[in-house]
Image (cartoon, rainbow, N blue to C red):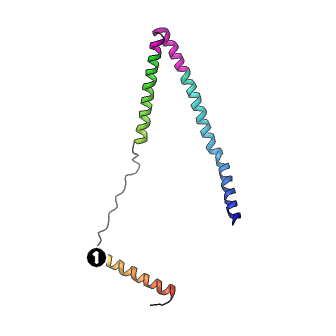
Amino acid sequence: MMGVFDGIAHSIGREVRRDVGKLLVPVLVALIGGLIGTTGAAFLTAWAYLTLSVKLGHGPAALLIGLALTVLAAVLLGLARHRLTKKIAADPPVSQQVAPTTGEADFAAEVAFTAAFVLARYLGEGSRD
Protein backbone atom coordinates (compact mmCIF):
# COMPACT_ATOMS: atom_id res chain seq x y z
CA MET A 1 0.00 0.00 0.00
CA MET A 2 2.85 2.41 0.78
CA GLY A 3 4.33 1.71 -2.66
CA VAL A 4 1.26 3.21 -4.29
CA PHE A 5 1.54 6.38 -2.20
CA ASP A 6 5.28 6.60 -2.85
CA GLY A 7 4.69 6.33 -6.59
CA ILE A 8 2.05 9.04 -6.47
CA ALA A 9 4.29 11.33 -4.40
CA HIS A 10 7.24 10.83 -6.76
CA SER A 11 5.09 11.49 -9.84
CA ILE A 12 3.75 14.69 -8.26
CA GLY A 13 7.33 15.73 -7.47
CA ARG A 14 8.39 15.15 -11.07
CA GLU A 15 5.41 17.17 -12.35
CA VAL A 16 6.22 20.08 -10.02
CA ARG A 17 9.91 20.10 -10.97
CA ARG A 18 9.00 20.06 -14.65
CA ASP A 19 6.41 22.85 -14.36
CA VAL A 20 8.39 25.12 -12.02
CA GLY A 21 10.43 26.43 -14.95
CA LYS A 22 7.27 27.40 -16.80
CA LEU A 23 6.04 29.31 -13.76
CA LEU A 24 9.30 30.75 -12.47
CA VAL A 25 10.54 32.41 -15.67
CA PRO A 26 7.52 34.75 -16.15
CA VAL A 27 7.57 35.66 -12.46
CA LEU A 28 11.28 36.51 -12.57
CA VAL A 29 10.86 38.53 -15.78
CA ALA A 30 8.00 40.50 -14.20
CA LEU A 31 10.04 41.07 -11.04
CA ILE A 32 13.08 42.30 -12.99
CA GLY A 33 10.84 44.52 -15.14
CA GLY A 34 9.25 45.99 -12.02
CA LEU A 35 12.64 46.71 -10.45
CA ILE A 36 13.94 48.37 -13.63
CA GLY A 37 10.73 50.41 -13.91
CA THR A 38 11.03 51.50 -10.28
CA THR A 39 14.63 52.57 -10.87
CA GLY A 40 13.58 54.54 -13.93
CA ALA A 41 10.78 56.25 -12.00
CA ALA A 42 13.24 57.16 -9.23
CA PHE A 43 15.63 58.75 -11.74
CA LEU A 44 12.78 60.66 -13.39
CA THR A 45 11.64 61.89 -9.98
CA ALA A 46 15.20 63.01 -9.14
CA TRP A 47 15.48 64.80 -12.51
CA ALA A 48 12.14 66.53 -11.97
CA TYR A 49 13.17 67.63 -8.47
CA LEU A 50 16.51 68.99 -9.62
CA THR A 51 14.92 70.82 -12.54
CA LEU A 52 12.07 72.29 -10.51
CA SER A 53 14.26 73.20 -7.53
CA VAL A 54 16.39 75.43 -9.79
CA LYS A 55 13.28 77.24 -11.09
CA LEU A 56 11.00 77.22 -7.99
CA GLY A 57 13.19 76.41 -4.99
CA HIS A 58 13.49 73.28 -2.87
CA GLY A 59 10.22 73.49 -0.95
CA PRO A 60 7.81 74.15 -3.81
CA ALA A 61 9.58 71.58 -6.01
CA ALA A 62 9.17 68.85 -3.38
CA LEU A 63 5.54 69.86 -2.81
CA LEU A 64 4.73 69.83 -6.53
CA ILE A 65 6.35 66.42 -7.10
CA GLY A 66 4.67 64.99 -4.00
CA LEU A 67 1.25 66.20 -5.15
CA ALA A 68 1.80 64.88 -8.68
CA LEU A 69 2.82 61.44 -7.40
CA THR A 70 -0.13 61.34 -4.99
CA VAL A 71 -2.58 62.17 -7.78
CA LEU A 72 -0.95 59.54 -10.02
CA ALA A 73 -1.24 56.91 -7.26
CA ALA A 74 -4.90 57.80 -6.66
CA VAL A 75 -5.70 57.47 -10.36
CA LEU A 76 -3.92 54.11 -10.63
CA LEU A 77 -5.64 52.77 -7.50
CA GLY A 78 -9.00 53.97 -8.80
CA LEU A 79 -8.42 52.19 -12.11
CA ALA A 80 -7.37 49.02 -10.34
CA ARG A 81 -10.41 49.14 -8.08
CA HIS A 82 -12.70 49.78 -11.03
CA ARG A 83 -11.31 46.82 -12.94
CA LEU A 84 -11.52 44.50 -9.93
CA THR A 85 -15.10 45.42 -9.10
CA LYS A 86 -16.38 45.60 -12.68
CA LYS A 87 -18.70 42.74 -13.45
CA ILE A 88 -17.61 40.77 -16.45
CA ALA A 89 -20.50 40.31 -18.86
CA ALA A 90 -19.16 37.28 -20.68
CA ASP A 91 -22.31 35.35 -21.48
CA PRO A 92 -25.65 36.44 -20.12
CA PRO A 93 -27.40 33.66 -18.26
CA VAL A 94 -29.73 31.68 -20.42
CA SER A 95 -33.18 31.41 -18.97
CA GLN A 96 -34.57 27.95 -19.37
CA GLN A 97 -38.24 27.54 -19.80
CA VAL A 98 -39.69 25.27 -17.20
CA ALA A 99 -42.35 22.91 -18.43
CA PRO A 100 -45.53 23.22 -16.45
CA THR A 101 -46.03 20.25 -14.20
CA THR A 102 -49.35 18.59 -14.20
CA GLY A 103 -50.74 16.08 -11.79
CA GLU A 104 -50.79 13.40 -14.50
CA ALA A 105 -47.06 13.76 -15.22
CA ASP A 106 -46.20 13.62 -11.51
CA PHE A 107 -48.38 10.56 -11.06
CA ALA A 108 -46.83 8.78 -14.07
CA ALA A 109 -43.33 9.54 -12.82
CA GLU A 110 -44.19 8.25 -9.36
CA VAL A 111 -45.64 5.03 -10.79
CA ALA A 112 -42.57 4.49 -13.00
CA PHE A 113 -40.20 5.12 -10.08
CA THR A 114 -42.09 2.77 -7.79
CA ALA A 115 -42.18 0.03 -10.43
CA ALA A 116 -38.43 0.37 -11.08
CA PHE A 117 -37.70 0.31 -7.35
CA VAL A 118 -39.76 -2.82 -6.74
CA LEU A 119 -38.27 -4.54 -9.80
CA ALA A 120 -34.72 -3.72 -8.67
CA ARG A 121 -35.38 -5.13 -5.21
CA TYR A 122 -36.96 -8.23 -6.69
CA LEU A 123 -34.10 -8.89 -9.09
CA GLY A 124 -31.33 -7.93 -6.66
CA GLU A 125 -32.26 -9.82 -3.52
CA GLY A 126 -34.67 -12.43 -4.76
CA SER A 127 -38.38 -12.38 -4.19
CA ARG A 128 -38.79 -11.68 -0.47
CA ASP A 129 -42.25 -10.09 -0.86
| Quarter residue 35 falls in | top right
Quarter of the image that includes the C terminus: bottom left
At label 1, the amino acid type is: Gly
Quarter of the image that includes the N terminus: bottom right
Q: Position of residue 47 (x, y in %)?
A: 53, 16
Secondary structure, mark 1, is helix
Q: Position of residue 113 (x, y in %)?
A: 40, 79
**Above or below, comparing residue 97 to residue 117 in the picture:** above
Magenta segment: 43-61
Of 3 and 51, the residue lying toward us: 3
| Quarter residue 118 falls in | bottom left
Query: Badge 1: how crowded within 10 Å, few (<14), some, or many (20+)?
Result: few
Of 73 and 92, the residue lying toward us: 73
Of 12 and 105, the residue lying toward us: 12
- Does the magenta stretch mainly form a helix, a strand or a loop? helix
**Above or below, comparing residue 123 to residue 84 in the picture:** below
- Pointer 1 residue: 103
Residue drawn at point x = 45 percent, y = 10 percent = 56
